[in-house]
Structures are given as structure tokens and as C-alpha cells.
Image (tube, rainbow, N blue to C red):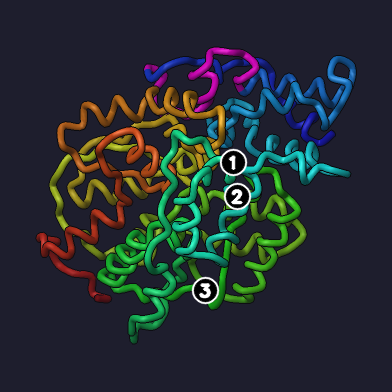
Amino acid sequence: EGVGRSAARCVGVAKCRVEGPSSGPGVMCPSYRATGEEKHSTRGRARLLHEMALGEVITDGWRSEEVREALDLCLSCKGCRSDCPVGVDMAAYKAEFLDRHYAGPGGLWRRPRSHWTMGRLPGWLAHFGRGLNAAMRLPFAARLAGVTPERTMPRVAERSFAYWFAQRASTRPSSLTLWPDTFTNFLAPEVGEAAVRVLEDAGLGVDLPPGRVCCGLTYVSTGQLGAARKVMRRTLDVRGEAEGPVVVLEPSCAATLRTDLPELLPDDPRAARLAGAVRTFAEALEELAPDWTPPRLDRPVTGQTHCHQHAVLGDTADRRLRERAGLRGDLAGGCCGLAGDFGFEPGHYEVSVTIAEDQLLPALRTSGGATILADGFSCRTQIGDLTDLRGRHLAEVLAEGLEEGLDSGPRSSAS
């Protein structure tokens, strides 16, 4: 009932129904832009949730297949959280609906298979690591995992970022905690390694949490809120009473820690403390190393601002950092269309590609050899799947400049 009341805040302005890339850098609502159907707009979904709460037109409540179908194409991009004039948060409503829709006797077995595979990916990666690469090469592996066959599954890295970090020696006192999110740790450790290189060049001491941590993103997005809370509490136990900034490289994980964590654990003061400690990579450099001068790269860039960064984190610090490094050009808005597990689920591929065609792919086609920036793992995966280009995290591009010895002016006094 709380979701129904929250959804009722929609007053029908219909900003979510604006179509096409001409609407500017906003995100909301990618599935409506792709389908043109009212039920796949933020307004349409909000109306259905409100009717579900009233129980007059939609009479089967949380078990409603009509509501589930309307929410199926919601990418949980969080765009409406910032772009909707009244702050409708469909990603949170979808998570709550799915949690209740599959609750009760038999609910576990009614869930899509992807909820057990992609939704619990952090656990699978932690327990099986590189062994998943062999498993995914087996016949019918994609079907068994509940993944559409049009997608290429990401490969697990030979060594995790946490393993790499543990093998290196550093005598610097810790200035910050670098968050080893699931995607960076197991699938793209090169991003974490590049971030350490840049942060240390800026004179900052980097440490990792003293145990396994997870923000709970994949559990939240698939509506497994009980499991999400358990994962979050375990993470808070690992962090303990630690203080200081926490730098999160993956925008979707940073957004989860800033918003979903305190919202799902409102009575745990540790949740609010961790949410307040979260910094993006660019925010950390600006706040903790204001005198550091980045390598002067002097090149054009294109790519995409992650939808969660747009909606929750903001990209002001990123823009300033790119400007100081001589990275010229604006990044596309919108959503890449992959959005975590969304683009991997059966029946979503065509919509996923159509969403990418809204803003991301046109920007890449006119890039003219520019460096492709995409801080989100999903965005980089979508770019790699749909083009012959490679997107990179801003940390990778800056670290490359440092390795090449590009002129960066005077170093920070702390380095």
C-alpha cells in the first residue's frame, strides 16, 4: 500500500513521455522512448500501481500480472527520481512490487531464472570465480542461466582486483577506502588498478575494506529485498566503525549505497554513515587532493554519463576533472539500454538496442576517433556488444596518461 500511495504523487505532467534524443541529456523514461506505449512510461506505471492500491480496477493486488508486465520493461535507471517534477521513483517501486509479487508459497519458484543468476551474481562470483567461465561455455548455458542468447556473457578476470591489491606493498597511510564492487573486483579489475595508480599519484593512501563487501544492487534491482538487507547488514558489519571517505568506482553501486542502503535500513545508523561517506572517483580527487594536477591529455571524448550518476550522484566533479585534464566534449545522456540484468533477460534485447539507439549509439557513430568514456560496467558492456569500440572508465584514461608521462604540470605537494 505504501508503494501505491507513493505512486499517487504522479500528477500527470507527463514529462516522462517526451520522446527522442532531441529532449536533451535527461534519462526518463527510456522504455517509453523505445516503445511509445503509455503503460511503459513512468506515468503509466504510476497509474497502474495506484489502481492496484485502490483495488477497484486491479483486484489481485501484488499478484497482478498486468502490473508485473508494465514494470517488466522498467530498466530501474532511476531517471525518474531526478527528472520527474514530483520525484516519482519507479526503480524503488518496482523493487518493492517484485519482492511482494514473488512472496508467499511457491513464490521462489515463480521467479525468472535470471533473478537467481544475474540477481545473485555477487555470490556466484565470490564462490566460483573463474570457474564460471567454463560453465558459461557449456551447451545451453545461456538458456539455463535465464539469459538471452543474443548476449555475450562477460568473462571473469584471471585475478580479482582485491587479489591484485593484496599482493602489492604500500607504506602510505590510508586516506580513503576504495570500494571493491562486484563488477570492478571480478569483471573489470583493470579499472580498480587504474584508480589506485591515479589516487596514489595524487598523494592519497588507498585501502580496501577488511573483508568481502557488497552494496546489494543486484538483489535490489531484482526485487529480492530480504536478501538485499542481509547483504547490506553483512557489509556494514565488515566496515564496522571505520571512518573516512569511501570511493566507489561503479556509479550504480555508489548510487545504491547513497540511496537504497539508508532507505532499506532506516533504523541502522551505520547505513546513514556509510551513505554519507560515499564519494565518486572525481569527487574524491577534488575533495581530498585539490592541489593535484591531472595529466594533460588534450583529446576529444564522447560516451555516456551513467543514468544512476545523472539521477543520484551528479557529474559536476567529473566535468571539472575532465576539463582540467584537457578532455574535450560532452557525454551523451539517456540510458545505455543494458542496465544491469535488464538487457540480458529474454525478451528485452530489441528494446535494449532501441534504447541504445536513442542517444548512445548516435554519439558513438559521430565520435571521429574520440576516446570513449563510460564509467559504468553495463555501459561499457553494451558498447562492446553493439559496436567495435571500447569504452573506458575515466580512471583508466587518466592512468594511461600518467604511464605515458604526459605533462601534468606541478605535482601535488602531498605526492
Q: Name the residue located 60 percent from the left edge and 20 percent from the top edge.
A: 41
Residue 117: which numbered mark, if any?
2
Residue segment shown in magenta: 22-41
Q: Is 56 positioned to the left or the right of 243 in the image?
A: right
Residue at mark 2 to residue at mark 1: CA–CA distance = 7 Å
Q: Is residue 73 above or below residue 229?
A: above
- The picture places residue 61, in percent across and down from the top left corner, at 85, 28
Towards the viewer: 205 or 221: 221
Q: Which mark is residue 338?
A: none
Which SS class for mark 3?
loop
Graded by Cα atoms within 10 Å as few (under 14), some (14 to 19) or many (20 or more), the crowding at tag 3 reads: some
**Picture quadrant of residue 414:** bottom left
Question: Sequence order check: which comes first, mark 3 or mark 2?
Answer: 2
Task: Give the residue pinned by disc 1.
Answer: 146
The amino acid type of the residue labelled 2 equals Thr
Cβ–Cβ under 8 Å for marks 2 and 1: yes
- Inspect the image, locate mark 1, and give the three-letter code of the amino acid beneath it: Gly
Position of residue 161 measured from the top left corner of the image (x, y, whole percent): 40, 68
